[in-house]
Amino acid sequence: MNTSPAQYRVRTRALVRRLTACLFGGFVAALMVGPQEGSQTDFGLSFHEATRPIRLLVFLSIGLVVFGLVTAWPQLKSQLDKPGSAAIGAGLVLIVTGMGLLRWYDPVGKLGAVDSAVSSTSGAPPLVAAFFSPAAWALAGVGAVVGLAAVARRSRVLGYVQCALSVTSAVIAFVAHEQLVHFAGGIDHSLGVYATAAGYLVLAFAGVVAAHATAAHRSTSAGIEQWLTWRPGLVPALAGLALGLVAFAQAAWFAPLQADTTFAGTGDLFSGAGLPGVASAYLRWLGPVLFGIAGVAAVAGSLFRLRVVSWCALAGAAFGLVLTFVTLYHIAETGAEVGPQYGRRWANLGAGGWVACIAFFLLGVAGLFAGHRPGSHDGESDAAPSGIAVRSSDEVRERPATRGTLIGLAAALVLFYPPTLPSNWQNVIVTQIAAYLLLAVGLNVVVGWAGLLDLGYIAFYGIGSYTTAYLTGALPLKPPGWLHFSPLVAIPFAIAACLVAGVLLGAPTLRLRGDYLAIVTLGFGEIIQLVAINNPHDLTGGPIGPTVPHPVIHAGPVHVTFGLDNLPYWYLLLALLVIVIVLFARLEGSRIGRAWAAIREDEVAAQASGVRTTRLKLLAFAIGASTSGVAGVFFATQVGYFDPSQFTLQNSILILAYVVFGGMGSLVGTLVGAAVLTWLPYFLQSQVPLQDTQMWIGALVLAMMIFRPEGLIPARRRKAELSGLEAAADREVGAVPAREGI
């Protein structure tokens, strides 16, 4: 096609602007990346260090690479949509995270520091000396190149080569790390090697997907779904098997900071210590036997589609999970009594027992998937993923196998991963992440579903907190004796108080729209904070704030005392969050949810169609506010002390940013956005100078708004609004097993 001079000039100007922006971005990255800092007398010192010629040339070169990628994006996109490409991207992210951001040996630090320590130490094992060098990055680069070639050419040979190379790389990284720890002689609980090994295994999976991809697999999601539905339960079974081997063979089970004993060492340590019979048998032989039976049954049942064997795997995994938890309980109790030097109960356990719980949970999920698959029969076998027929893409787009696998993995992690974290990170997930998850879900109702901009949402959070303080007798204004409750009993009262406050705010103001509604809600939030500050004697306690007692649960044999540890609050939040999510998921698909969507899209058209807009907007305000009340109860009881400074406009805007970042209107996106943006500042504290953390978060949010304005995990409707409907090519038929037909 001939290009006119005018079109050529327009295209040239666009390329020049893009090149300038990329080079300027490289220059800004040079200023942001690195530990260089100025001083109180010379603020130009950091600028001088950041713009050294060689360093600046490197970052400008990165800008040129970005310019080339953006310019060639239309040609690259067709390759990135091929099966296996997304898995390669995910694997590379895990590898880069493990090798560049996480620690590899606790006494030393990250991979770069370990490289320097190994190179300056004589007598290191050959594998350690070879791996902890630039060879580690070269190995990752070779894996990425081979994987991309396998995806681009859809070559079965390259796919299998990529799989073998990635598995070998994972084994090399793991063995080199083990030899390093043995050689150095320290206690290590770093996660870099595990993230890197997991990344290589994801690359291996990408190679298998690419090897079996056919012309009918038009996208990565279709290829992955095809593999997950080929043998339902096989992926969680293999993941559970791998984690179980790590738990029983390598991870610490007791006293990780003092003895760092593995499973076998824990059995020897507690021999004759008075453990109950079940726990003693578990440590001697019962635990590995149960794991072996459940693992073999889960893999065999899913691979050969043996329904009876799959149900046996589910039963064995459930029994193993219960016995593992019981054994951990007895280890913690007995260890705290017999050896106080090993720490208090539950804090003296290593990660091994909890990883074993995750393994048993995933094996149970595998047995459930394989045994509950409709239409499967014992011994039934169909063709491998390359033997396919077709069905409509509407069915493929649902991706039930992918969704079920992700739900099972997420459930295992949220239940059993937090106990493996250090106490400071447990405090972060409880005091920061947990409460803001509830707040973000509640604000998503108002902003994401009903389309009402609320800048004073934090006020309802404060109302829920102060209601809890009043009902527990923590305020100057005391409740009557019959109204004095435990903090957990205050939950329905806090919900009612916030619901009434939402109605009182919404009734006179919801006839306003857009910026006017935002201004009114902003003023409401400021009023609530000022009232809390300026009533020191007769109502709120003023700027000092109340001190709320921690709850205690005594229900039959269950005795839980909150406040001694962070984990009880985590599981309390988890129970509340599951209830809220289930109710809201039902609400989203109801007539009310569809009416909210209509109001958000066009309120005038919705009202003309018979939707009672004022009543439904008032309902959205009330429901969102009541969810904030639940979060207020959780916050007040967990922190024990709070003051009005924690209910500011900045926090309202922060919660709104969580919703927008995750994806407005998407429950899953809202949860992920809140979790990521509350976790990220604490993670960045160990990666960049403290004063630079907000700059990096701002850069991340800015990049998201430019390149993915619909959010991290957008709702389908929101994604269609910003990105348009699916292209015609995506409406073609997708891949299904041959025996299922059309």
Image (cartoon, helix red, strand yellow):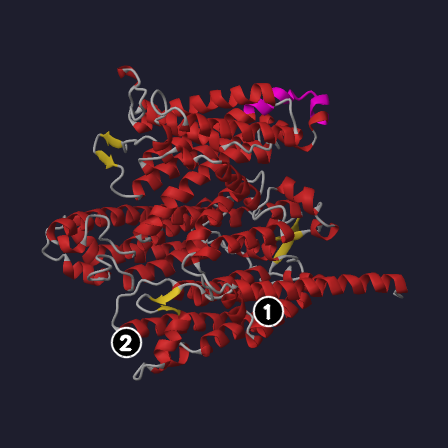
- Name the residue type under label 2: Phe
How would you classify the magenta stretch by its main secondary structure?
helix
Q: Is residue 184 visible?
A: yes
**Can you identify the residue that label 2 sits on?**
183
- Residue under the point 56% across and 40% down: 666
**Which residue is drawn at the image coordinates 47% and 55% (left, top)?**
693
Which numbered mark, 1 or 2, is in the foreground of this view? 2
* Residue 313 picture location, percent across and down: 36, 50
- What is the three-letter code of the residue carrying label 1? Leu
- Labels 1 and 2: the sequence-earlier one: 1
Q: Is residue 273 left or right of residue 431?
A: left
**How many numbered discs, if any?**
2
Label of residue 305 in the image? none
Front one among 603 and 147 = 603
Q: Nearer the viewer, residue 524 or 276?
A: 524
Residue 499 vs 300, above or below: the answer is: above
Could you tell me how far apart the alpha carbons at marks 1 and 2 are, in whole angstroms? 36 Å
Magenta segment range?
605-619
Q: Nearer the viewer, residue 524 or 137?
A: 524
**Residue, disc 1:** 148
